Image (tube, rainbow, N blue to C red):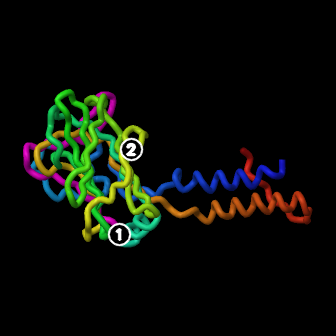
Amino acid sequence: MKILFIPIAVIWLSIVPSTRAAVIASHSGSNDPSSEGFVLSDSTAVAGPITADLGRNAWSVDSTGGPYNHRFSMSASAEADANSNGWTLTMTVRLVDISDALDFGVYADYATSTGIYQIGFGTQPDGDPIIGLNTDSGFTSFAFEGGGTGYHTYQVAYDPAAGSATLSIDGINRLSGWTGRIGPAPALVNFGSYGSGHANWSEITFSSVPEPGTALMAMIACCLGSWRRKKFPTPFSCSSPVF
């Protein structure tokens, strides 16, 4: 029984950073992104709240060609943390236009001094999404066959150790090794339209991956200390977490 303390501590060390990601920018449901910390920099599209769209609330952006852009400006410290520890850009979105060429008519990105990670969308004639990851030499694209016209969750996850990002759709890894485009650029999270496109944004969230917190370290130290005291009893005791 005593030997369980060390594996438990190791398990907590591995899972807590991912479950306690620090949310930096977030839009949710039919809320106006301008009320959530985003700034509308261009507004030549029809946009507004939509409810009960295939069971979801969303912010709808329908552009016939002009720009529409919501942006969230990050602090220098938040940018440094995200680029050093890793980050995720998560979008739950429905692409409304059918047979829409892959471009930036629907787009989102994280622009940073170390690179620009920009994702564009399109659809096939049957409505299946097409996703383009922008690079210095053009799009790296992925056709989500069988995806259909409903909502899907797209997540870009940057790994600082690899110096690249992966794309997952509905929790399944689809592309890896994406290095984005060369910066520099101010630290911004952007979404909207540069061109013709129609999308309903149910969520867009940018999060950094924090280092293990001091509370976690204290818990591990307490577990290890309790194990040692059970082996070498002392007048002081430390209660361990119950699992």
Disc ID at residue 119? none
- Amino acid bearing label 2: Ser
Vertical arrangement, residue 34 with respect to residue 94, above or below: below
Residue highlighted by disc 1? 75
Vertical order, 22 against 51 (above or below) = below
Residue furthest out toward the front? 137
Q: From where the camera sits, is residue 217 visible?
A: yes
Percent across and percent down for residue 92 are 33, 41
Q: Is residue 56 magenta?
A: yes
Report the span colored magenta: 47-74
Give SS at disc 1. loop
Taking 11 as reference, is 210 left or right? Answer: left
Q: Would you call the spot at circle 2 few (<14 residues within 10 Å), some (14-19), or many (20 or more)? A: some
Task: Work out whether residue 162 or residue 104 is closer to the camera in this orientation and state it.
Answer: 162
Residue 57: x %, y % from top left: 30, 36
Is 193 part of what is drawn in magenta?
no
User: If the image is split into quadrants, where does the C terminus sit?
Assistant: top right
Q: Which residue is mark 2?
A: 168
Residue at the location (26% across, 71% down)? Answer: 184
